[in-house]
Image: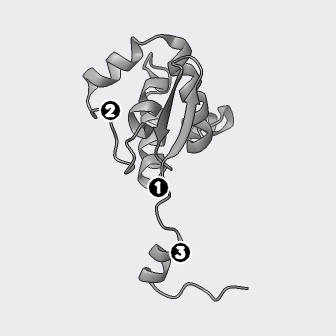
Amino acid sequence: MMPAILNFEELLAAAPRQKPIAYHCKAFGREVLLRDPTSSDIDEWRMYCQKNIGNSVPFAAKLLQILLCDEQGERIVPQDDEALAAIGEMDAAGVTEISEFAAGLMKSPTDEDIEEIQKN
């Protein structure tokens, strides 16, 4: 068994940032790269979901906005409403395909999670 993590530096070293994950999108006929989600990425996604419960917003587009990246893991989609709207206007097949894969990476809120959020 590994010894316990005893300080902040050991904690950071224990979980280094992973390389981007390649996904071949059949609908686009090309590969895309997605960030291995950080805690901040997951928090951003959860807050977006919580804030927009019951609203007509582009959830799939938001996932792509958060996770699509370059080879270094840097986001490639501008973090503004115009970019989000532009993704929302793309062909649904590709956006849906990638967002379903991305949702697995983000451990998207389930219906039960959303119900719990609504209670609080």
Judge whether 116 appears above or below 87 on screen. Answer: below
Question: Which residue is located at x 52 percent, y 68 percent?
Answer: 15
Mark nearer the N terminus (3 vs 1): 3
Q: Amino acid at mark 2?
A: Val
> Dot 2 surroundings within 10 Å: few (below 14), some, or many (20 or more)?
some
Give the percent coordinates (x, y) of residue 99. Answer: 54, 28
What residue sits right under mark 1 in the picture? 39
What residue sits right under mark 2 in the picture? 77
Please report contact status of discs 3 and 1: CB closer than 8 Å, yes or no.
Answer: no
Specify the quadrant of the image occupied by residue 103: top right
54 and 96: which one is in front? 96
Give the percent coordinates (x, y) of residue 35. Answer: 46, 46
Judge whether 55 appears above or below 79 on screen. Answer: above
Question: Which residue is located at x 42 percent, y 13 percent?
Answer: 90
Judge whether 28 appears above or below 10 on screen. Answer: above
78 and 31: which one is in front? 31
Q: CA distance from mark 3 to mark 1?
A: 14 Å
| Quadrant holding the N terminus | bottom right
What residue sits right under mark 3 in the picture? 14
